[in-house]
Structures are given as structure tokens and as C-alpha cells.
Image: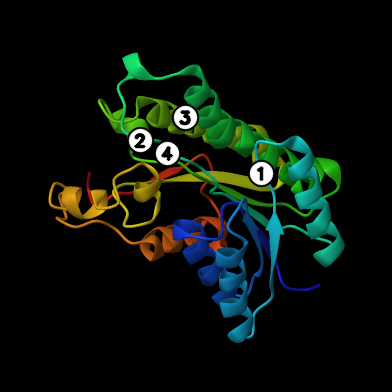
Amino acid sequence: MNAPVVLITGGSRGIGAATALAAARAGYAVAVNFHRNAAAAQAVVDEIKAQGGQALTLQADVTQEEDVLALFAAIDTAWGRLDALVNNAGIVDVSCRVDAMGVARLKRMFETNVVGSFICAREAVLRMSTRHGGRGGTIVNVSSAAARLGSPGQYVDYAASKGAIDTFTIGLAKELAAEGIRVNGVRPGIIDTEIHASGGEPNRAQLLGAQVPMQRPGTAEEVAQAIMWLIGPQSSYSTGALLDVSGGR
């Protein structure tokens, strides 16, 4: 297997799907992870294969350690290498003040957005770090501009989980800098993807786009291009960086 291999968690829709397609165009073999939507993940893989690329779908709930172990084992079996991880799997919930948030919501938010990213990064490090006999690699964590803004009155829990991802990115980057692995993050702003519908506001990107300094929402493809820069050799001296893709917001 000569092509570099990238795993994209939550790769069936939105930013994940756009990144999978961009990575395939850049010559990567792409592992498209999904949780529930097998059809959407398969559609991404079919598009990659139709363009002559290599890809496969892999089901896993990133909050479940056994699922993550099986996910990485499947990549080991299929390709025998891993060169990049994009920690993109994440959730949002309906708009809600903190004084109305239940513990079940908070656990779900942090288990998916934070714990899942930690588990996936751990398994990637075990394969890529020169300390463990690997050849090095890159990790990109998908954060959010909400980490800076706090999302008051909407989802402070989501913002806090992404703040944790920012700290995780910085700390892991320093931990791995001498082991051949670069770790960076992207912080998308208002991006026109399906995630807003899952939070009960399908038109949120259009409604808030005018408030962005660039006066429009971003696209999944624009975020994907930033991710591709961070996992590629063009950013060879960047680690621990948090790249805002937010239209100036």
C-alpha cells in the first residue's frame, strides 16, 4: 500500500464528507467512518471510487472503545498503515440555556465530542508515533468558533466541549512534536451543513450568515480545504495551531 491513508470520523456528511472527497482527490486512501447513516457513507465511498480513488466505509460509535478498536483494526487489515486522522465526529443539541440542561445531554455531548476524539487520537498515536515504531503522521481536530464565543443561550455545552478540543489539540501537539506527529485544529464558524438541523435549526446558517463579517455562511468544502492544508506537507512546520475558518467571526 503506497498511498497515504486517512481516517475521517463522522465522514458521511457535511465537513467530514467534503474532507473525504478532497483527501481522495489529493491521493489518499480514505476510511470513511460513520455511526448510523450507512447509506450516506456509502455514497461518499462510491463517489470516491467513481473518480478512481480508494475508500471504504467503517461503522463505529466513537464513544464506545470497542467500536474504536475495531475501527482501527479494520484499517490495519485493509491497508496496513495510517498517515492521518481527522477527528471530525461530533454532535450538537437543541438550543438550550445551561439552567435547563440535563445530565444525559451533557454526558452525550462530552462523550462524543471530547472522549471520542481522545480515544481515536490514542489509537492513531499508537500507529503513527515514531516512539511506537510508526513513520509519523498528522492529526486534525475539528473544533468550532463556538469555543471562542461561548454560544450563550444556545449551547454552552457544545462550546465548552470544543474548548476542550482546543486545549487537547495544543497539549497533544506538544506531547508528540518530537515523535513525528503534528496535531492541529480547525475552528469552523457558521457553516452550511446538516448539523444545524440536528440542533433543531435547519435554517440557522442562512439566518446568521448576514451577521458574519464576510456576510455569508461558509461551505463544508471551504473547511475541508483548511483541513487538507493541515494534514498535508504544506503545513510541515505547524503544530498546535488552531485555524479559524469563520469568515472573520
**Residue drawn at point x = 45 percent, y = 18 percent:** 102
* Label 3 – label 4 distance at C-alpha: 10 Å
Which three-letter amino acid code belongs to the residue tagged 1? Asp
Q: Secondary structure at mark 4?
A: loop
Pointer 4 residue = 92
Q: Which label lies toward us, 3 or 4?
A: 4
Can see residue 14?
yes
Which three-letter amino acid code belongs to the residue tagged 3? Ser
**Residue drawn at point x = 53 percent, y = 49 percent:** 88
Q: Secondary structure at mark 1?
A: loop
Pointer 1 residue = 61
Q: How is the image coloured?
A: rainbow
Please provide percent x and percent y for residue 35.
62, 50
Q: Which label lies toward us, 2 or 1?
A: 2
Q: Sequence-wise, which precedes: disc 3 or disc 4?
A: 4
Q: Quadrant of residue 61?
A: top right
Please provide percent x and percent y for residue 76.
83, 58
Q: Quadrant of the C terminus?
A: top left
Q: Which label lies toward us, 3 or 2?
A: 2
**Residue drawn at point x = 55 percent, y = 65 percent:** 40
* Label 3 – label 1 distance at C-alpha: 18 Å
Pointer 2 residue = 94
Nearest to the observer: residue 61 or residue 183: 61
Residue 158 higher or lower than 14, as above or below: above
**Residue drawn at point x = 67 percent, y = 41 percent:** 121
Pointer 3 residue = 161
